[in-house]
Structure formats: structure tokens, C-alpha cells
Image (cartoon, grey):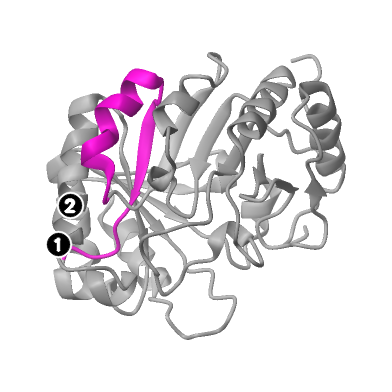
């Protein structure tokens, strides 16, 4: 594709993540704030539209909207309606406000959602998220509303922690019953808090039980198919293949282009909402892309 960005390591940039706000209604134990050092911003609609249009012009076809919690942003459906039509638009959410917004988001052009859900037990869920009583029930309602609105496939993001690793079989059963894809994510334990669950043991059990194992190109992720369930394993830590197949840039909630989730020393400040200028800045950021776990 003419103009598509390829970095000096031969990695094409086909995906973009934009953090719409740093605000969130939960305080999850493991949150990495999309790699923002001092999250305290909310990017303007004009800048989001400019970034999306500039990215689409140079071959980016996948746009994921994140936060903070993106459903806290006012006018979200109107913003999504202004995204380039050739882009696939997805959203990562904790799901608490999804039931009220799912239909409007789908009508505006949102294609699918990832919903973060680390436990099916209310007391464990509250301990991990520092949320309120009733939040888990609202997430369940949000999952139903998203399915009814056609925001498919729905992926359930599950960070594997000591608090929830015993629940993983139940979570997989839950996803099988609801037609969800379980995405088990290795904790980015950058602060060495000792929260990580044993994802190696979990993956070994999946490998032993799977009817079929498929390796996705992105990050060389393993997808395990077992008795009707789909389970993906995401390993961002100490993983050269994760970095070698990274295909995305990020934009922070305060308007900086971030070439790597795990680095904050190579950011590019967006200084204009003009598409031509933003395209230049995206190319600058692409030139700074380097695998965190070098080959």
C-alpha cells in the first residue's frame, strides 16, 4: 500500500490506539495507564479526528479507542461517527457503562469491544478493581447489550493474577457459554509487586487440552481451541516475538504519539490538528520505533 509506514526493523504500522481520556471509574491493582507516566488529560475531538484521518491516509486500518475508561467521555458516539470509514474501530472498556451505550456506539460505527473482566466473583472483582458493589452485575449487563448490538466478536480481557488464577477454568467456561473470546494476559509487573499469576502453568494445561492450537501473526499469539472455547494468550513480558511483530502506534490522552508502550523517552508531541502535519509527526514516531525486547 503506497505510503504505508514501515519502521527500521521491517515492522509495518497497521494499528493505532488512542487513549481518549485518563479518567477512570476503577483503580485496578495492575493498571499501567496505557504507558502514560503522569496521566492527566483528555485529548480533543479535533485532534482525535485529525490523527485518525492522517493515520488512515498512510495505511492504518485498525483503530482502538482506550482510556482510562473511554465510556466516560462525553459525546463518544458522535466522535466515533466521524472516524474514517475504511477503519475498523474497536474499544477497550471495563464495561460498567456499556449497557447504556452499546446500541448508540454500534449505530455510530463501532465494530467491536474488548471488555476487561478479571473475576466472576463479586468480592474478588472488587478487590482487584477497587470498584463498587454492583459493578460486576453492570459489566454482565454490558456484555449482553454489546452482543445484542452486534459489537462482535467480544473479547474478554483477563489479566492473570494470583487473585484470579484459580478461576481461569470457570472464566473459560463462561466465555464458551456466551460466545466470547477469552484473552488471558500476562501481567506487566513493571513495579515488581508480585501480583502475577502462573500463566505458564495455565498455558501448559491449555496446550494439553486443546483440540487445535493456532498461532496468530500479531505478536505470535497462541490461540487455543478447546471444546468450543477460544482462548488467546498474550505475553508482553520478556518476549522478543511480541515486540518483533508489534504493528501499532499509540496516542496518549494528552496528545503525544508513543512508539512503544514500555518507553516514555521517545514521545512525539502532536502540535497541530492539521492532517498533513500529523502525518509528518506519525512518520517521526515511526522512525523512533524500536523493539523493547530487542531481537
Q: Are marks 2 and 1 in contact (CB under 8 Å)?
A: yes
Instruction: Give the residue at x 28% y 68%.
Output: 131
Residue 67 percent coordinates (x, y):
49, 50
Image location (x, y in percent) of residue 208: 30, 59
Is residue 246 placed above or below 55 in the rendered structure?
below
Within 10 angstroms of label 1, few (less than 14), some, or many (20 or more) residues?
Answer: few
Disc 2 to disc 1, how far (Cα)? 6 Å
Residue position for label 2:
138
In the rendered view, tell whether residue 71 sits above or below residue 13. Answer: below
Side of 131 where 55 appears, left or right = right
The image quadrant where one finds the N terminus is top right
Q: Quadrant of residue 116?
A: bottom left
Instruction: For mark 2, give the secondary structure.
Output: helix
Question: Is residue 16 depicted above or below 82 in this figure?
Answer: below
Q: Residue 257: horizontal and vertical position, in percent?
A: 73, 45
Residue 228 in view in this figure = no
Residue 134 is marked as: 1
Q: Which residues are magenta?
A: 96-120
Q: Secondary structure at mark 1?
A: loop
- The residue that appears at 60% across and 60% down in the rendered structure is 40
Amino acid at each position: 500500500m503506497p505510503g504505508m509506514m514501515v519502521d527500521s526493523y521491517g515492522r509495518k504500522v497497521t494499528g493505532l490506539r488512542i487513549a481518549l481520556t485518563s479518567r477512570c471509574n476503577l483503580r485496578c491493582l495492575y493498571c499501567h495507564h496505557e504507558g502514560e507516566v503522569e496521566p492527566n488529560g483528555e485529548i480533543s475531538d479535533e485532534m482525535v479526528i485529525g490523527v485518525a484521518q492522517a493515520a488512515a491516509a498512510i495505511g492504518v486500518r485498525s483503530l482502538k479507542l482506550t482510556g482510562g475508561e473511554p465510556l466516560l467521555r462525553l459525546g463518544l458516539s458522535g466522535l466515533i461517527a466521524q472516524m474514517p470509514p475504511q477503519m475498523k474501530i474497536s474499544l477497550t472498556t471495563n464495561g460498567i457503562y456499556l449497557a447504556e451505550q452499546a446500541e448508540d456506539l454500534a449505530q455510530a460505527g463501532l465494530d467491536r469491544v474488548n471488555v476487561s473482566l478479571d473475576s466472576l466473583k463479586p468480592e474478588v472483582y472488587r478487590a482487584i478493581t477497587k470498584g463498587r458493589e454492583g459493578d460486576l452485575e453492570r459489566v454482565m449487563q454490558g456484555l449482553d447489550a454489546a452482543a445484542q448490538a452486534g459489537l462482535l466478536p467480544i473479547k474478554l480481557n483477563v489479566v492473570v493474577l494470583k487473585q484470579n488464577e484459580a478461576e481461569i477454568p470457570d472464566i473459560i467456561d463462561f466465555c464458551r457459554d456466551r460466545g466470547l473470546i477469552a484473552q488471558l494476559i500476562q501481567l506487566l509487573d513493571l513495579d515488581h509487586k508480585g501480583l502475577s499469576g502462573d500463566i505458564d502453568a495455565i498455558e501448559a494445561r491449555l496446550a494439553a487440552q486443546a483440540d487445535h492450537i493456532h498461532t496468530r501473526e500479531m505478536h505470535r499469539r497462541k490461540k487455543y481451541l478447546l471444546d468450543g472455547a477460544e482462548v488467546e494468550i498474550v505475553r508482553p513480558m520478556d518476549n522478543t516475538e511480541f515486540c518483533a511483530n508489534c504493528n501499532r502506534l499509540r496516542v496518549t490522552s494528552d496528545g503525544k504519539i508513543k512508539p512503544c508502550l514500555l518507553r516514555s523517552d521517545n514521545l512525539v508531541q502532536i502540535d497541530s490538528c492539521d492532517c498533513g502535519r500529523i502525518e509528518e509527526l506519525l512518520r517521526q514516531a515511526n522512525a523512533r520505533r524500536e523493539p523493547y525486547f530487542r531481537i
